[in-house]
Amino acid sequence: MTALLRIGTRGSPLALAQAHETRDRLAARFPELASPDAIEIVTFKTEGDRIQDRTLMAAGGKGLFTKEIEEALLDGRVDLAVHSMKDVPTWLPDGLAITALLPREDHRDGWISPKAATLDDLPAGALVGTASLRRQALVLMRRPDLRVIAFRGNVQTRLRKLEEGHVDATLLAMAGVRRLGLADRITSVLEPDVMLPAVAQGAIGIETRISDDRTNAYVTALNCAETASRVAAERGVLATLDGSCRTPIAALALISGTALTVKALVIRPDGRQWFTTARSGAVADALAMGVDAGNELKAMLPSDFFQAPNAVADGPVV
């Protein structure tokens, strides 16, 4: 049997878990997709997967985990692509769109350390490993006495490196460890007032060709309206600030009833200066609120704001 739908994804355990979730939701919704052969998962090794000797910031920033999959989507080798939305560039290639967002998982970061129950408990001078410029900056903002080093690899690889003693602590997205069944490895959860999340952290996005009516009819049925509104607000901040992997930006939108709040932060890579703002309004105005918050932050920033030393991007890689 020829597959009715082909899903493009990275081959990491977490990416595959997200692709399987998408497949299972489609199969549960549409009887013709329930057959074991109806949906094929096609894996790709992206440039972001191949680069292990330097950070993604040094290699070019956002898009390194999506380019090859989007090329396959554009030329028809796959029908839909499944992404972690925090890895998706602000602007998509012509002809492609994020057609649906699955219900969002935990948006918070998890703290993992054999030496300290929380970030505040880590001894001065301890070494924290992270591949995220945002996490680096927020760690140094709260604990300027710590050292931060670039930490590459998938979730399992970073956990192994931590066990081997390469670093004293690391941070991972709670959504990822939960999807992998590894939540028991988390030492403690970092609440947003300590570690404001990355834009769209915990959200899975499904990208399709705008012109592909058949696939879009399937995919749009999976869209979670609440997640879509939250992500729209957060990505509105990002787009307005022209954010990239070299730009430490954090944002979190939350919904209560018909009201949405969004908090956004921009911080120097060394954690020494930051600006924050927040908006509250109707869910229907999610994108506009995010854009407005981004414009306010943009107006606050000194011209040299992103020229601070960058320990993660410019230092050694573990």
Image (cartoon, rainbow, N blue to C red):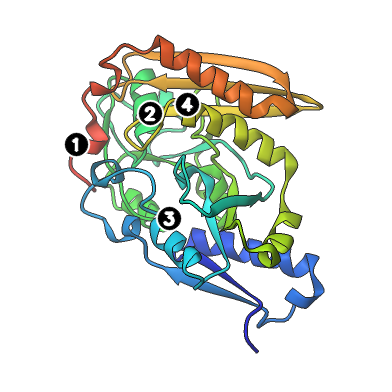
Q: Residues within 10 Å of mark 3 (few under 14, many from 20)?
A: many
- Tell me the kind of residue under disc 4: Thr
Counting residues from the start of the chain, the first of labels 2 and 4 encountered is: 4
Counting residues from the start of the chain, the first of labels 3 and 4 encountered is: 3
Query: Which structural element holds mark 1?
Result: helix
Disc 2 to disc 4, how far (Cα)?
14 Å
Q: Mark 4 — residue?
A: 240
Locate the N terminus and report the quarter of the image it occupies: bottom right
* Viewer-closest of 173 and 56: 56
Q: How crowded is mark 1: few (under 14 residues within 10 Å), some or many (20 or more)?
A: some
Q: In the figure, 196 relative to 44: above or below?
A: above
Q: Mark 2 — residue?
A: 248
| Badge nearest the viewer, 4 or 1 | 4
- Tell me the kind of residue under disc 3: Thr
Q: Mark 3 — residue?
A: 66
Which residue lies at the image location 29% right of the left edge and 41% below the top edge? 57
Q: Mark 1 — residue?
A: 314
Query: Which structural element holds mark 2?
Result: loop
Counting residues from the start of the chain, the first of labels 2 and 1 encountered is: 2
